[in-house]
């Protein structure tokens, strides 16, 4: 929320935000009167996730990456409800927010608006370039999402519809949303950690095609207590076009609905390889891959501190306000699991065998 010339009391901030959230709920209800709503109920990390979308295009954006989620008769408390509408499909605009718009020429895809004292019960994401808005009530565990035109949302939104929202919600449920890949075998899974370009996606997808269970190539939910455990959040996999060409099995399956600056076509793994996608697995190891350029793939033991340096920056830096608890939870995670460096060789067929050996040796 932009600063004003005269201070606003926290109680007034809270009142304004409560009122605005109610206005968003009313706008969503109006959208449902103009166009049918599609409701999708699944379990995410053993908690109920309900996603209601208004507008067929928005349903087609949100659903493919979530089709792997199971249905459970009983769930843990602390679920999440998402109410979303497409203005283009319904004619219902976003209610005018109670803060001034940013100056002209400053439209960004900023991950979050920082709220002042009094706004602690809410989180907000405003991505102006994509005309995509989220407001989340921590108390209600309910989010409202508006988009101006779902059909124009870039490909990366299709692959991961609302990661900021999942991060806010996960923090309420003792979960971590990590920038990490995750693959596994029968005995357990390994987290693949490192900055963008380190080889996480290439490694995760190559392992999946070699018989591994697939949980993530980029974003993964993790529970640290009582034992480290990973959950598949979005079943999508993304590769740059020149890397995708190395995967003949995937090339014809990749889609790019709205090419954008990221330039990564997406493969919905559950749609094409449902038997390879695992909903959850116990974690056995943390592996930090990096492209070595040598023919052979080699592994070596690294310290928890080195593993944390590979994991934490890419997970925390995109946030406007990194949470200290998240950093400490990541530190606890790498201390409780064996950690390895993986020097990725050019003989890609060797990579799955090395990872399999690391997981098995960590049992």
Image: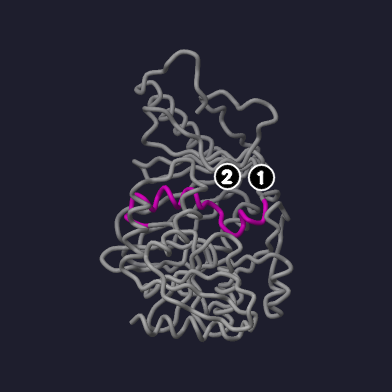
Residue 121, how many percent across, how many down? 37, 36
Q: Would you say residue 251 is visible in this rendering?
A: yes
- Magenta residues, start to end: 154-175
At x 44%, y 51%, the residue is: 167
* Dot 1 alpha-carbon crowd within 10 angstroms: few under 14, some 14 to 19, many 20 or more: some
Is residue 265 inside the magenta stretch?
A: no
| SS for callout 2 | strand
Task: Using the image as rendered, state which of residue 330 and residue 211 is in the foreground.
Answer: 330
* Dot 2 alpha-carbon crowd within 10 angstroms: few under 14, some 14 to 19, many 20 or more: many
Residue 246, how many percent across, how many down? 70, 77
Residue 125, how many percent across, how many down? 52, 40
Task: Using the image as rendered, state which of residue 90 and residue 309 is in the foreground.
Answer: 309
Q: Find disc 1 in the rendering and name its residue.
A: 89
Is residue 164 inside the magenta stretch?
A: yes
Do the residues bearing badges 1 and 2 touch, measured as CB atoms within 8 Å?
Answer: yes
| SS for callout 1 | helix
Q: Kindly report the distance in space between the C-alpha atoms of the residues bearing marks 1 and 2.
A: 8 Å
Determine whether 89 is above or below 258 in the image: above
Mark linked to residue 85 = 2
Residue 85 falls left or right of residue 192 = right
Rendered image coloring scheme: one colour
Residue 336 falls left or right of residue 104 = left
Magenta segment's dominant SS is helix
Q: Residue furthest top?
A: 6
């Amino acid at each position: 929320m932009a600063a004003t010339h005269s201070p606003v009391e926290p109680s007034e901030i809270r009142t304004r935000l409560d009122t605005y959230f109610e206005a968003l709920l009313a706008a969503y209800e109006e959208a449902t009167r103009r166009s049918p709503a599609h409701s999708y109920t699944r379990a995410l990390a053993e908690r109920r996730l309900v996603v209601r979308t208004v507008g067929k295009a928005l349903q087609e954006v949100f659903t493919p990456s979530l089709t792997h989620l199971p249905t459970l008769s009983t769930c843990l408390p602390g679920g999440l409800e998402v109410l979303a509408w497409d203005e283009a499909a319904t004619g219902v605009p976003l209610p005018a927010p109670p803060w001034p718009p940013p100056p002209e020429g400053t439209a960004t895809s900023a991950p979050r608006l920082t709220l002042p004292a009094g706004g602690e019960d809410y989180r907000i994401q405003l991505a102006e370039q994509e005309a995509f808005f989220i407001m989340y009530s921590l108390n209600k565990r309910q989010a409202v999402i508006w988009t101006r035109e779902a059909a124009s949302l870039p490909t990366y939104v299709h692959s991961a519809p609302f990661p900021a929202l999942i991060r806010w919600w996960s923090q309420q449920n003792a979960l971590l949303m990590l920038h990490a890949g995750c693959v596994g075998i029968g005995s357990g899974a390994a987290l693949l950690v490192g900055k963008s370009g380190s080889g996480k996606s290439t490694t995760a997808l190559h392992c999946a095609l070699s018989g591994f269970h697939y949980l993530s190539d980029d974003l993964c939910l993790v529970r640290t207590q009582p034992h480290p455990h990973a959950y598949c959040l979005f079943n999508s996999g993304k590769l740059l076009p020149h890397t995708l060409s190395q995967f003949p099995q995937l090339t014809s399956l990749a889609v790019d609905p709205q090419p954008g600056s990221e330039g990564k076509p997406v493969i919905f793994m559950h749609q094409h390889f449902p038997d390879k996608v695992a909903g959850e697995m116990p974690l056995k190891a943390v592996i930090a891959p990096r492209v070595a350029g040598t023919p052979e793939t080699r592994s070596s033991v690294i310290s928890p501190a080195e593993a944390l340096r590979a994991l934490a920056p890419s997970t925390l830096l995109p946030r406007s306000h990194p949470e200290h608890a998240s950093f400490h939870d990541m530190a606890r995670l790498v201390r409780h699991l064996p950690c390895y460096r993986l020097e990725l060789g050019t003989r890609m067929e060797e990579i799955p065998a090395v990872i399999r050996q690391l997981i098995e040796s960590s049992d």
